[in-house]
Amino acid sequence: MMVLLAQTPGTPTGPEFGKASPLGLVIILILLVGTALLVWSMNKHIKGLPATFEPEHPEPDQEADEGTEHGVVRRPESDSGITESS
């Protein structure tokens, strides 16, 4: 009686039960090749980057860092405090 309860009628049995299909191996190999190509492409792009991103002529950026605003006049009596000049 115990043996009959453990065996359900829809359970697959036989010599092919539990074996993986070759399709799984093909999918894994395709994923590995795709990953290798992505790593190769990324390394190629990284080698093309400059060693540093510091600008060669930082003068225009330095003016903005110091708060210099060309073409803008500050007037304390205006509502916003900044007025465009022409």
Image (cartoon, rainbow, N blue to C red):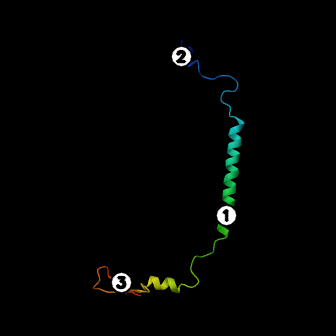
- The residue wearing badge 1 is 43
- The residue wearing badge 2 is 5
Position of residue 5 measured from the top left corner of the image (x, y, whole percent): 54, 16
Kindly report which numbered mark, 3 or 2, lies closer to the viewer in this rendering: 3
Position of residue 53 measured from the top left corner of the image (x, y, whole percent): 58, 76
Kindly report which numbered mark, 2 or 1, lies closer to the viewer in this rendering: 1
Which residue is nearer to you in this view: 12 or 66?
Answer: 66
- In the structure shown, which secondary structural element does the residue marked by tag 2 occupy? helix
The quarter of the image holding the C terminus is bottom left
Residue 23's place in the image compared with 59, above or below, is above
Left or right: 32, with 69 as reference point:
right
Left or right: 49, with 64 as reference point:
right
Q: How many marks?
A: 3
Position of residue 22 measured from the top left corner of the image (x, y, whole percent): 72, 37
The quadrant in which residue 82 appears is bottom left
Please state which amino acid type lies under the numbered disc 3. Answer: Thr
Please state which amino acid type lies under the numbered disc 2. Answer: Leu
Mark 2 neighbour class, 10 Å CA radius: few under 14, some 14 to 19, many 20 or more: few
Residue placed at 70% from the left, 41% from the top? 25
The residue most toward the front is 86
- In the structure shown, which secondary structural element does the residue marked by tag 3 occupy? strand
The quadrant in which residue 39 appears is bottom right
The first of marks 2 and 1 along the sequence is 2
On residue 83, which mark appears? 3
Cα distance, mark 3 to mark 2?
A: 88 Å
Residue 27's place in the image compared with 44, above or below, is above
The first of marks 3 and 2 along the sequence is 2
Mark 1 neighbour class, 10 Å CA radius: few under 14, some 14 to 19, many 20 or more: few
Residue placed at 70% from the left, 24% from the top? 15
Position of residue 70 measured from the top left corner of the image (x, y, whole percent): 44, 86
Please state which amino acid type lies under the numbered disc 1. Answer: Asn
Residue placed at 70% from the left, 51% from the top? 33
